[in-house]
Image (tube, rainbow, N blue to C red):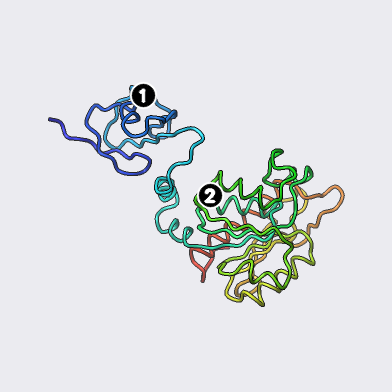
Amino acid sequence: MAEAVTILLNEREHRVPPGLTLGQLRDQVLPGAEVLVLNGFPAGPQTVLTAGDRVSLVVKGQAPPAAELEALMIARHTPGVHQRMKAARVGVAGLGGLGSAVAIALARMGVGQLVLADYDLVEPTNLNRQQYMVEHLGLAKTAAMTRILAGVNPYVQVTAHNLVLTPENVEQVFAGCGVVVECLDAAAAKAMFMEAVAASLPEAYFVGASGLAGYGASNAIQTRRLGERIFLVGDLERAAQPGRGLMAPRVGVAAHHQANLVVGLLMDPGHPEL
């Protein structure tokens, strides 16, 4: 009798008898699966499985169980990266063009706990650069982003604060966060928040942003270290003005600079790669 062969089923080793088809595997493991993926490509149910095949079975619109999704993310990010992300607690202050993109990027990385703070509603003018859809118009940004993140990674723990940040509440809102990302709009609010984090959360890393407007050179947006625990992303020059407003591509570049730095700080706090 021929020996069973080993395949990877949703990134986990699985032994199957020789000659088993993809459809037979589906019927045994996940009968409701409508999408059968073999080695990265859609495949028919009559396809015979061979040793080393990588199989994904997908039920449309249904999130995989937590352990399965974690296995898939570990396979992409590698175990050491995933475990550090899962153990992290990161704060995002402001959920506009920067913050909405930062929060989604960190959820895709598998950051275990995200603390979000914003007081605003989703408005039509936000759709030019922020990660919201028409269906979110009129919702609090905290509520809309919580829904979005649940669709990206339902196993990230999201704590949302629908409020105006002040020097008095920053410590309570972002307690326990190893990194806090500043994504606020007004210069005065940015300065207040940086001072409040430095005073009340001295062990937290601060990742701010300034100078993002227009459609200028992407390479002008840089990450700078201003202190032991303070970083600033942007060109530090291009403020919004007529003809040079806040635009999705350049804001997105800056947001992902911020998110990428957060990952670096979580992976190697003493030596983040800028």
What residue lies at 58% left-to-right and 66% top-to-bottom? 179
Left or right of 205? Residue 119 is right
From the top left corner, tell me how far across and down residue 138 is, in percent: 75, 45
Q: Which quadrant, please, contains the N terminus? A: top left
- Comes first in the chain, label 2 or label 1: 1
Q: Is residue 46 above or below residue 91?
A: above
Mark seen at residue 232: none
Quarter placement of the C terminus: bottom right
Label 1 environment density (alpha carbons within 10 Å; few <14, some 14–19, many ≥20): some
Residue designated by label 2: 108
Q: Secondary structure at mark 1?
A: loop
Q: Which residue is mark 1?
A: 45
Mark 2–mark 1 distance (CA, rounded to whole Å): 30 Å
Q: Label 2: state its secondary structure.
A: helix
Mark 2 packing: few (<14 Cα in 10 Å), some, or many (20+)?
Answer: some
Name the residue at the top extreme. 46
